[in-house]
Image (spheres, coloured by chain):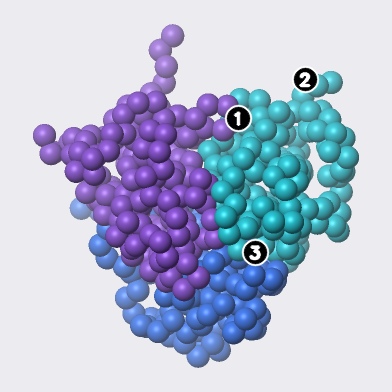
Chain colours: A purple, B cyan, C blue
Amino acid sequence: MENSRDARFAAIAATLGYSFEGEIQKGGNYTSTVQHGDQVYVSGQIPRVGSTVVVTGRVGAEVSLVQAQLAAKVCVMRALALLRQSLGSLERVKHILRISVYIQCAQDFTQQSEVADGASEVLYAVLGPAGVHTRTSVGVFQLPKNASVEIDLIAAAEPPAPSVQ
Amino acid sequence: MENSRDARFAAIAATLGYSFEGEIQKGGNYTSTVQHGDQVYVSGQIPRVGSTVVVTGRVGAEVSLVQAQLAAKVCVMRALALLRQSLGSLERVKHILRISVYIQCAQDFTQQSEVADGASEVLYAVLGPAGVHTRTSVGVFQLPKNASVEIDLIAAAEPPAPSVQ
Amino acid sequence: MENSRDARFAAIAATLGYSFEGEIQKGGNYTSTVQHGDQVYVSGQIPRVGSTVVVTGRVGAEVSLVQAQLAAKVCVMRALALLRQSLGSLERVKHILRISVYIQCAQDFTQQSEVADGASEVLYAVLGPAGVHTRTSVGVFQLPKNASVEIDLIAAAEPPAPSVQ
């Protein structure tokens, strides 16, 4: 069972104790994923599970490095859930090209890369070599809903199958 | 008249009371748009009209949410003006793939998504379904020229026509 | 000698007084460059030379504009070194599509664009017209290892040659 990406995704979700099932696509004027050719853009994800942001506050002040790494894992699990929902299966991901990791941090907190390691670890655990990505980690002043971390992503994927009419 | 994207762009510009005509391409070592294949990258835009940045200061302190949403609208109108200038017409935009919305905010301001809604609304109003994009919204510490908001964009577009010699 | 991009890169490195030789690829769950088709993503680079971050601290406070511009030059030289390492030669770069410039700054520092000019100048000096890029410059609260500047990049390049077996 651990041989498929979707199974590894489920195993990590179980370990974290969170469910990423259900409809998490945003409607309206923007959306969670846009596929163009073989590239998929995923909107910035905060560590929300259902209607709760599970890690909030300033990293290096009231939020520890370990809590921030958990936040990064939840953000990237959400991004993977959206990719799976968009593509049908994580097997159709060819490569993760780029993640941007934004961390709400204290003025003197300089371990942004260590926070991002939480996300990188999950991508590799689920996708293997296809999950080895480029990344950028920066410390920002605030994030939506007081989230501690926000992550967006660009993936290469199998292009959509032509529709049969 | 409201049936074309360029006309809808003009109508929104009139409603905002700003003109986005004229040369706003930057020269020199960098530029406002680069097209590669069918992707167009647009440089980060601040809410500048002519030589004036029309919304400056920290959102959640001296700048209100409504003023910040206006700033986001002006930023994205500038991005659309640049796309139109680069492509000849907004009819040649196939899809908006990604916007990144940077907001100069107060320490406890957490409505970055609500600010970005101003930009998303304009993209949908002008482009319809082709304007439905992914986005990332973060709160930063400062922006060029004390701008309240900065937005960059990636679009899919018709590839350039081969030149006839 | 100044006629090739690789030679111009070496000349600028000598002028800066830094060496960008040697293995600067990161191993592990993420990497410094990912090529997909004819696009190359480069991870966020701080102004590190060997194991030393050569410009640290807050721009507009203990770090001057000139020092920050030097930081931006070092960041982008690292990005070019990674592109060269990935592609074999900078001659294979077709175009720089986008740079994002993150500046750790003081609350009232608004010359982010002027800092980014350091990076833009190097890209043009090395690559000529192929180095004319779009860019986004923002002021952030902190950066990894207290770096003053971080820059990431997307380039268009010749696709990898098919391997002969």
The C terminus of chain B appears in which quarter of the rendering? Answer: top right
C93 horizontally vs A2: left or right: right
Give the quadrant of residue B161: top right
Kindly give the residue lying farthest to the left in the view shown: A1
Give the quadrant of residue B29: bottom right
Residue on which disc 1 sits:
A29
- Tag 2 secondary structure: loop
- Tag 1 secondary structure: loop
Residue on which disc 2 sits:
B3
Residue type at mark 3 is Gln
Residue B109 pos. (x, y %): 60, 52
Residue on which disc 3 sits:
B142
- Tag 3 secondary structure: loop
Of tags 3 and 1, the one toward the viewer is: 3
Residue B145 pos. (x, y %): 74, 64
**Mark toward the start of the polypeptide (2 vs 3):** 2
C130 horizontally vs C55: left or right: right
The numbered mark at residue A120 is none
Residue B60 seen: yes
Q: Residues under labels 2 and 3: Cα distance?
A: 39 Å
- Crowd band around label 1 with a 10 angstrom C-alpha radius: few (<14), some (14–19), many (20+): many
B6 horizontally vs B72: left or right: right
Give me the residue at 58% from left, 59% from top: B107
Q: Disc 3: which chain? A: B
The N terminus of chain B appears in which quarter of the rendering? Answer: top right
Kindly give the residue lying farthest to the front in the view shown: A62
Residue B52 pos. (x, y %): 85, 57
